Image (cartoon, grey):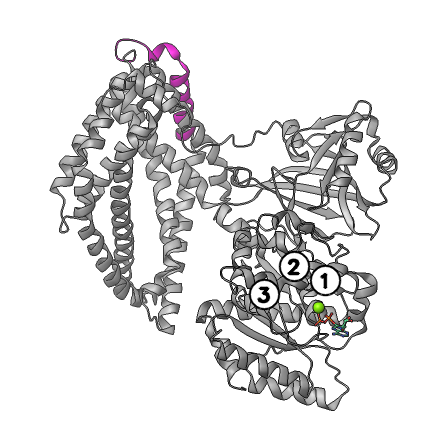
């Protein structure tokens, strides 16, 4: 594979040493110094670029020019570079072109956050052949990283990059670099080194619990570990919610919260009754202050496509939709104030503090209830939840009220969380069949719920406009939108029956899921 | 992956200049770009300072296995070259022996799907078995045309040939090159013809010393005279080609070809 090779040479001798090596190898070259540069690396909060093997950084040169570069992480090859005036916060804000095309599907709506600021300089080398064709590139990078209170020097590194189809100079130079006194092969990019100094760890954020419940774990220990992880996720996203960096912070926080509430309910017996009641109420409160903004986020996103619902929408309707979106936005502003107050409240602080103290007090997670094996307990919970899902599902039909669909959706979600949380203990391949059908079920119910929420919000706006003297022009477009949305909700409700029956009929997958796993299962899943 | 062939029955009309300069622009925008220098004379290879030599020769390439190994990086990021080789002069013979003589080139390019965004074919002149392979492998046939009566006849011949052979699943985009705006005939043809052939690009490449300089500089004009008239003209042309590709994608491939037929 074509890739960039990294070396550290002793005593900041890079450029001179490299020049000598190239001369010794008899390779003609040109060296161009690039004076002071400011370099900054970016990724999303959840490391989407890193996970996609991409590295994005900006380089500001002394003349003020800013160049944004996208590099393949493992090969070190540059994919695209563009000149920008400002660093875009979102991929969607980038100028049309390859950079945007590459980043948008990876980042989606996530904001680019600066990860590491570097200042330094670089000497660029080009090695030629007799035709003065570039047959190899190299550079010597000398940088410091800003840790906030000081500048830490990074190791000077020599980077050698071959040109496709020209391997000879590479084969001549690499051994010389390796043999150079005290030289060292470096694994990883400048970026990795900078992160190490900043004590940042790529992929250290996971919205989903990554810990796997093992056989032999007790319910108490497993619950405690999962709760701690989820609390960590809530806390990690707080700041992004407060600063409103992007909509995913609130989303992730809400998911962690919902999982916490699900698990709390399932495991109420391992907590003391007053503890359970207290945290159940407090987390319900937290859900109530975070919910409306999230709902409006979803609504606002969907409202961008309202015009499609009315196809062909008339020009005046476009204006009315804009007015409607304006109303939604102002509702969101009001709800956000409420959310921020909540996050700044002592009630929230003591919720977190108390919950963490409880989770960290190991002795509280032992005792008869807590010491049961986690796997059996999880299976019991799942069986119970599964029975609820079946019960509710059988009663639902296309005519059922929204609230019954909603209740069904909650049951399905709880079952899904349980299966996912105890994935490791269940042996993942076994849960797979049920999960597939469950996901399909969840999708239908999710769509139904989305339409129901939309309809409820629009109905509420319609109602409040009815009492006003000069209602917003938005009211005109609400009625036709409601017609469309109700129609769609009905169609989804009709789909439900067939999806549910597929889920209900899958006896085999269910039996597999509910069987207590044997050692053989575990060996199989470990492979 | 889109394949763009720079083709004309005639030689010396600016095919190679177009392939090299447009590919350079494509790569500069970040598209992964390959130029295949199919002309045994190796002009494109020369411009990229790569020797017109493929160790496996035309025969080796035709077997497909050594295609990737023969690709060379150019001096520009994202821009690779599959060099010419003197043995390409026997391509027609080799193609003739293949099982599907007219579809060899498509088969050879297929594995590069996913590796490149644009592949430019710099074609030799003439209507040969190789050209038929090119017509079947390409998404777009860019036809650089000098605004003279003889060149227009060649364009006409090409359109007729394609119609006769039922070759209509690619777009023929002719455009003018080496336009000398001081000459009345050039001016008239450049103004009039696009009205008759809607497929014709509206941008054209002027006759410019920068393009001639490419031989001395051995590089694309954008790399040594990026602010010059000709570099700008290639930029505008490249922009127009991308626009046309978008339209073609939306409206179906045949639109531009059918329009091109009208002049025939
Ligand atoms: N726009 C132009 N202005 C001036 N000279 C040109 C221009 N385009 C091409 N040439 C010159 O004309 C000659 C033929 O061009 P080339 O691109 O090699 O044509 P082809 O590939 O069609 O044979 C070359 O010497 C080239 O430098
Ligand atoms: Mg040529």
In the image, the segment drawn in magenta is: A348-370
Query: Which quarter of the rendering shows the C terminus of chain A?
Result: top left
- Residue placed most toward the observer, A342 or A172: A172
Q: Residue at x 78, y 25 (%)?
A: A183
Q: Find residue B147 and report its horizontal and vertical position in percent.
A: 68, 84
Do badges 3 and 1 share one subunit?
yes
Q: Relative to A99, is B186 on the left or the right?
A: right
A120 versus A430 height, above or below: below
Precedes in sequence: disc 3 or disc 2: 3
At a point 45% along the width and 45% down the height, the residue shown is A247
Q: Main SS type for the magenta part?
A: helix
Q: Which mark is residue B44?
A: 1
- The chain to which mark 3 is attached is B
The answer to which image quadrant residue A358 occupies is top left
Contact, mark 2 vs mark 1 (Cβ under 8 Å): yes
Q: Which of the numbered marks, if any, corresponds to residue B35?
A: 2
Query: What residue appears at the point 72 percent right and 30 percent down from the top-left corner?
Result: A150
Tell whether position A368 is magenta: yes
SS label for mark 2: strand
A440 or A316, nearer to the observer: A440
The answer to whether residue A244 is magenta is no
**Is disc 3 in the same subunit as disc 2?**
yes
Which residue is label 3 attached to? B4
- Alpha-carbon distance for marks 2 and 1? 8 Å
* Residue that extends furthest to the left in the rendered view of this protein: A395
Q: Is residue B44 left or right of residue A281?
A: right
Give SS at disc 3.
Answer: strand
């Amino acid at each position: 594979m074509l890739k960039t090779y990294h070396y550290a040479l002793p005593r900041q001798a890079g450029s001179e040493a490299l020049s000598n090596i190239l001369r010794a190898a008899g390779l003609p070259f040109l060296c161009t110094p690039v004076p002071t540069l400011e370099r900054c690396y970016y990724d999303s909060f959840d490391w989407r670029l890193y996970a996609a093997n991409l590295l994005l950084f900006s380089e500001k040169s002394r003349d003020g020019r800013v160049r944004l570069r996208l590099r393949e992480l493992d090969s070190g090859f540059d994919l695209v570079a563009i000149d920008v005036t400002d660093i875009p916060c979102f991929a969607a804000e980038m100028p049309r072109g390859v950079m945007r095309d590459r980043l948008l599907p990876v980042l989606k709506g996530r904001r680019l956050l600066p990860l590491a600021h570097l200042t330094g300089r670089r000497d660029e080398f080009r090695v030629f052949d007799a035709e003065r064709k570039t047959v190899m590139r190299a550079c010597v990078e000398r940088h410091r990283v800003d840790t906030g209170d000081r500048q830490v020097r990074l190791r000077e590194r020599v980077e050698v990059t071959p040109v496709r189809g020209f391997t000879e100079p590479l084969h001549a130079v690499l051994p010389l670099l390796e043999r150079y006194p005290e030289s060292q092969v470096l694994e990883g990019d400048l970026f990795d080194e900078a992160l190490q100094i900043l004590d940042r760890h790529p992929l250290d954020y996971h919205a989903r619990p990554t810990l796997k419940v093992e056989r032999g774990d007790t319910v108490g220990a497993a619950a405690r570990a999962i709760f701690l992880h989820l609390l960590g996720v809530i806390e990690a996203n707080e700041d992004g919610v407060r600063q409103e960096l992007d909509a995913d912070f609130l989303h992730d926080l809400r998911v962690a919260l919902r999982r916490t509430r699900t698990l709390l309910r399932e495991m109420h017996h391992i907590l003391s009754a007053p503890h359970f009641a207290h945290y159940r109420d407090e987390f319900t409160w937290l859900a109530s202050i975070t919910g409306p903004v999230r709902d409006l986020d979803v609504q606002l996103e969907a409202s961008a496509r309202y015009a499609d619902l009315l196809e062909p929408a008339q020009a005046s309707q476009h204006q009315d939709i804009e007015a409607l979106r304006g109303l939604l936005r102002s509702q969101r502003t009001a709800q956000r104030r409420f959310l921020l107050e909540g996050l700044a409240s002592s009630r929230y602080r003591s919720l977190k503090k108390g919950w963490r103290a409880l989770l960290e007090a190991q002795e509280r997670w032992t005792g008869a209830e807590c010491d049961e094996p986690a796997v059996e307990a999880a299976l019991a919970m799942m069986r119970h939840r599964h029975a609820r899902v079946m019960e509710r599902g059988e009663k639902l039909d296309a005519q059922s009220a929204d609230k019954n669909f909603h209740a069904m959706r909650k049951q399905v979600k709880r079952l899904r969380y349980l299966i996912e949380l105890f994935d490791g203990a269940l042996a993942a391949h076994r849960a797979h069949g049920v999960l597939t059908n469950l996901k399909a079920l969840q999708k239908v119910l999710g769509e139904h719920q989305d339409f129901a929420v939309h309809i409820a919000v629009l109905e509420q706006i319609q109602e409040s406009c009815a009492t006003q003297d000069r209602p917003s022009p938005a009211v005109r477009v609400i009625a036709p939108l409601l017609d469309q949305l109700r129609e769609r909700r009905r169609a989804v409700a009709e789909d439900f029956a067939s999806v549910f029956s597929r889920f209900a009929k899958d006896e085999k997958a269910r039996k597999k899921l509910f069987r207590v796993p044997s050692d053989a299962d575990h060996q199989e899943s470990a492979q | 992956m889109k394949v763009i062939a720079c083709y004309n029955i005639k030689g010396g009309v600016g095919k190679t200049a177009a392939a090299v300069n447009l590919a350079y622009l494509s790569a500069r925008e970040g598209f992964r770009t390959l130029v295949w220098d199919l002309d045994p004379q190796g002009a494109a290879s020369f411009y990229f300072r790569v020797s017109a030599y493929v160790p496996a020769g035309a025969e080796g390439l035709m077997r497909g296995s050594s295609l990737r190994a023969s690709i060379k990086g150019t001096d520009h990021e994202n821009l690779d070259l599959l060099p010419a080789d003197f043995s390409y002069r026997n391509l027609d013979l080799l193609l003739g022996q293949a099982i599907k003589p007219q579809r060899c080139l498509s088969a050879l390019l297929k594995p590069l799907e996913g590796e490149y965004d644009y592949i430019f074919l710099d074609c030799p002149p003439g209507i040969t078995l190789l050209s038929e392979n090119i017509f079947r492998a390409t998404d777009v046939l860019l036809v650089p045309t000098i605004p003279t009566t003889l060149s227009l006849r060649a364009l006409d011949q090409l359109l007729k040939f394609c119609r006769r052979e039922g070759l209509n699943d690619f777009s023929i985009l002719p455009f003018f090159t080496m336009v000398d705006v001081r000459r009345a005939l050039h001016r008239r043809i450049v103004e009039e013809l696009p009205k008759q052939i809607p497929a014709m690009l509206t941008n054209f490449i002027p006759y410019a010393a920068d393009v001639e300089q490419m031989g001395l500089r051995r590089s694309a004009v954008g790399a040594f005279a990026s602010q010059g008239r000709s570099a700008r003209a290639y930029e505008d042309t490249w922009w127009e080609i991308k626009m046309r590709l978008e339209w073609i994608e939306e409206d179906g491939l045949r639109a531009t070809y059918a329009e091109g037929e009208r002049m025939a």
